[in-house]
Image: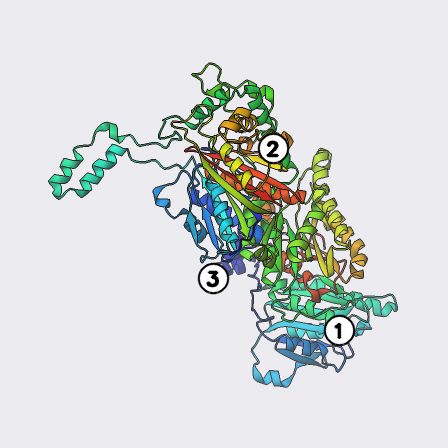
Amino acid sequence: MTARRAAILGGNRIPFARANGPYAHASNQDMLTATLDGLVARFGLQGERLGEVAAGAVLKHSKDFNLTREAVLGSRLSPRTPAYDVQQACGTGLQTAILVANKIALGQVDSGIAAGVDTVSDAPIAVNEGLRRVLLDANRAKGLAGRLKALAGIRPSQLVPAAPSNSEPRTGLSMGEHQAITTAEWGITREAQDELAVASHRNLAAAYESGFLDDLVTPFLKLSRDQNLRPDATIERLAKLAPVFGTRGPNPTMTAGNSTPLSDGASAVLLASDEWAAEHNLPVLAHFVDAETAGVDYVHGDRKADGLLMAPVYAVPRLLERNKLTLQDFDFYEIHEAFASTVLATLAAWEDDAFCRQRLGLQAPLGAIDRAKLNVTGSSLAAGHPFAATGGRIVANLAKLLHEKGSGRGLISICAAGGQGVVAILEF
Amino acid sequence: MADRYLSLINSPLGENLASWLKLPRPAALRRYGLGDPLLPGPLLLGGLGGGAASAPGAKGLRDLLVNAGVGVVEATAAGATWEPSTAWADADTDAKWSALVFDATAATSVADLALLRDFLAGGLRRLGASGRVVVLGRAPDGADPVQDATRQALDGIVRSLAKELRNGATANLVLLDTTEAGLAVVESAMRFLLSGRSAYVDGQVIRLGGAAVAAPADWSNPLQGKVAVVTGAARGIGASIATVLARDGAQVVAADLPMAGESLARVANRIGGTSLQLDISAADAPERMIHYANSRFGGVDIVIHNAGITRDKLLANMKPAQWDSVLAVNLETQLRINAALLQPGGLRSGGRVVCLASTSGIAGNRGQTNYAASKAGVIGMVRSFAQSFAERGATINAVAPGFIETEMTSAMPFATRETARRLNSLQQGGLPVDVAEAVCWLSWSASGGMNGQVLRVCGQNLVGA
C-alpha cells in the first residue's frame, strides 16, 4: 500500500470567548455543532457524507460520551457521516487532524473533519468522590433498611462537589505553577514574555484587519472576534500586571497578560485527498506531511529538562530526523502559546548546546529560528485557548498562510497536560 | 412586524367592519410557490388586429400562453362589447377571469383606445382575486405624433386602472421598444406578470428591447447551472433573494460582512449554497469576490447588489462620516464591482446584474439625502452601464422596493408605518420575497429584453411614481 498526502482544504472556528463570557451558557455540543455548520456553509457540504469526523473536548460531561457524533447529527452534514471522540488534553485538536490525515493517506477515507471544542464555563461538576461511593453502595444494598444504613454513611463534607481543576493529578500543581518552574529554570525574563504577548495581540489584530480571518472564523452568539484580543496591547501596559504564577519563588514573571486565559470555543478543519478536493472544486491550501507525539517524565524527571510543557522540545527533533530536515527549513512556525514562557523555553532548549547533546542526543544544538516567522498571525495569548480547539485553529491558520505564500513548509508545536507534546509539519 | 390589520380585515368579522366603516380592504396577495401554475384560472385575451404579439399567423401570444399552461379564451370585438369565444361561454359561464391580456401593439389612433376600454370594461366585471391586467403596447418612437400620443395614452390607462383595481389585482404595461422586439422577450415578462411572482408589482411600465434571448429548458428551474452572488445575504431582503435564486435553480454564493457570518451560514445551509464572508467596501473585494466564484464554481453569471446601509439625518445635521459611509457602501462598491465584472474573467457572457435601488432614490425622502443620493446614483449607474453590458450579451437593471415589511420598517413609529403601508394601490406593505421575485426574474436568461431599467416593487406607491 502506498500512502498519499492528505490535503487541508480549509477550516472554521468560532471566535474564542473568555470563560464565563458570551458563551457561558453554550455547551460543547452547541459550539461544535455551530462550528461544523459554519464549515458546511463555507464549503457547500450540506448533506455531504464525509469519511469521518474526529473531534474531542478536554472538559467533557459524562453524558457527552458521543459528543462528536451528536454534533454531526445536529449539523447539516449527512447523518451517514460517522464520528468519534478523541481526548489528549491540549493536543486533542492536532491529534484529530493527524488521525484523519493518516486515514486519508492510507486511502481508508477520502475526506474528513478534524475538530475540537472546549468550555470552561459549562464545565462538568462531579459529585464528591466519597458521596459517589456511598450512593453506589446504597444502590447495591438490599431492602429499605440496607439502603438507609448505607445512606447514613453520608458526611457533610461529602456534599461539597468536586469542581473541575486544571491541576496535574500526580503533582497537585496547576499548569501555571509547573510552567513557572520551567520559566525560572530556563531563566526566561518578564520582558521577553511580555514582548511575545504584545506581538501575539498585534499580529492577530492585523490578521483580522487585513481580512485574513474572513474565511477562517464564523461569528457565534454575537461575538465576531476573539474576546481576549487587545489590539492596543503595549509592553508598558503589560508590565504593570502583577505575577500570578510562581509567586512563592524569588522572581515571579508570569502574569495574566503573558499567560493564556481560560477560554470557550471550537474549531474544525476540512481534510481530504487531492482527488476529492478536485471533484468538489475546492482549492487545496496545504498538505499534511508528518507528525510526532512525545511525553516527558515531569513527575520524577529533571526540573529543568523535563518540565510539564516541554514534550514538544523532544518531539520536534525526532520529526525533523525522520523527514531529513533542520529546524531552519521552515517558512512558518506555529508554536502554541500556552504561556509566553512555554514558547521561549522551547526555543531556548533548542538553542542550548548541552541540552541538545545530553537530552536530545544530537551532535549540535538545533539552533535558533527566525523569529519573524513565528506565530505571524498571532497565537493563543491573543486568541485565547479553548484546550481542544487550539489545534484546529493552528492547522487551518498555517494551511492558509502556506497557500497565500504559494510555497514552503510550516511547523506546528503544541504542548499538552500530562507532560505531552504533539507536533506536525505542513507543506504547500 | 406582521401586518395585523391585513389579517383582521380578511377575517369574517373584519370584512363586516370594513364594509360598515368604509375602511381600506387590503387583500391577501397570490404569491408564487414552486410548481404553481401561472394562473389559477382562465385568461381572457384580446387584441387589435395586426399587433406584434398576434403575428405571425395571428396566434403567437395565444400559443405562447397555452404552452405555458394557461387556459386562454380569445375575445373578439362585437360592436361595443368583446365576446369570449363560444366554446368557452358554453363550458363555464360563471368562472372568473384570472387575467385580462390585451395586445395593443397595433394601436395607431385615439379611436383604437376605445377598443381597449371596451375589452377591459367587459372583462373587469368578472376579474378574480389577485387578477392580472397586462396591456402590451409599443414605445413611442417619434415617427408619428398621432401614433405616439396613442401609445403614450396606454400609460395613463394602465396606471389609472391599477389604482381602481381591488382584491389584490394588478395592472401593468409592457412596451416593446423596437420593431425587432418580439415574442421571445415577451414570454419571460408574461410569465412574471401573470404569476404570483409579481404580487407587489403594480402600475408599472416594463420596456423590452430586442435582445436575443434563450428560453430555459425548464421554466420551473430557469436558473439551472447559473452561479449567483448575492451581497447582504445574511438577513432580510438579501436572504430572501438568495432563497428565491436557489429555488429557481441557481448555485448561490451568499455574501455578507464577516460580522454577519452566523446568520449568513444559516442562510447558506438552508438553501444549499455557500457563505462568503467579505466586506464589499474593502479595496480588494471585487477581486476576491470574482476569484472566489471562478475558483469554486468556474465563473459567475449573476451578481445581486443588495448590501446597503442607512444613516438617516437631516442634511443640516449630517456628519461627513454618515454621508461618506452610505455613499461608499451603497454606490461606490457597486461601481467598483461592476467595473471589475466587465473585465476579462469577470461576468460570464449572458450574465445578469441586478442592483437594489429604492423609491427614496426616485422620490426623495426626508432625512435621507445621503441614502437617496446613493440610490438615485444606482439608477444612473445602471442606465450608463447598460450599453457595456449589452455588448457582452449581459444586462444590468435596478429594482426599487417601496414599503417592504422588514426589520428596518418594523422599527418605524406606529403611525408612520401604518400610513406608509397603506399609501399604495394594494393598501399593504410588500414582503421581502416580492422584491426577491423581481430580482430573480431579471436574472433569468430569458429576461434579456430588460436592460438599464428600474423596476419598482411598490404596489404602485403614491410616492415615487
Residue for point 88% across, 68% down: B143
Chain of the residue under the numbered disc 2 shown in the image: A
Question: Do discs 2 and 3 belong to a common subunit?
Answer: no
Q: Which mark is residue B114?
A: 1
User: In screen coordinates, is A223 left or right of A144?
Assistant: right
Mark 2, Cα crowd under 10 Å, few <14 / some 14-19 / many 20+, is many
Q: Which mark is residue B12?
A: 3
Under circle 3, the secondary element is helix
Question: Cα distance, mark 2 to mark 1?
Answer: 83 Å
Front one among A56 and A237: A56
Q: Are marks 2 and 3 in contact (CB under 8 Å)?
A: no
Chain of the residue under the numbered disc 3 shown in the image: B
Q: Percent from the top left, x then y, of residue A383?
A: 54, 34
Q: Residue furthest top?
A: A250
As shown in the figure, which amino acid type bears the numbered disc 1?
Answer: Ala
Under circle 2, the secondary element is loop
Decide: is B69 above or below B234: below
Q: Is residue A242 visible?
A: yes
Which numbered disc, 2 or 1, marks the residue closer to the eye?
2
As shown in the figure, which amino acid type bears the numbered disc 3?
Answer: Pro
Question: Cα distance, mark 3 to mark 1?
Answer: 39 Å
Q: Percent from the top left, x then y, of residue A360?
A: 50, 31
The color scheme shown is rainbow
Residue for point 55% across, 26% down: A344
Q: Are marks 3 and 1 in contact (CB under 8 Å)?
A: no
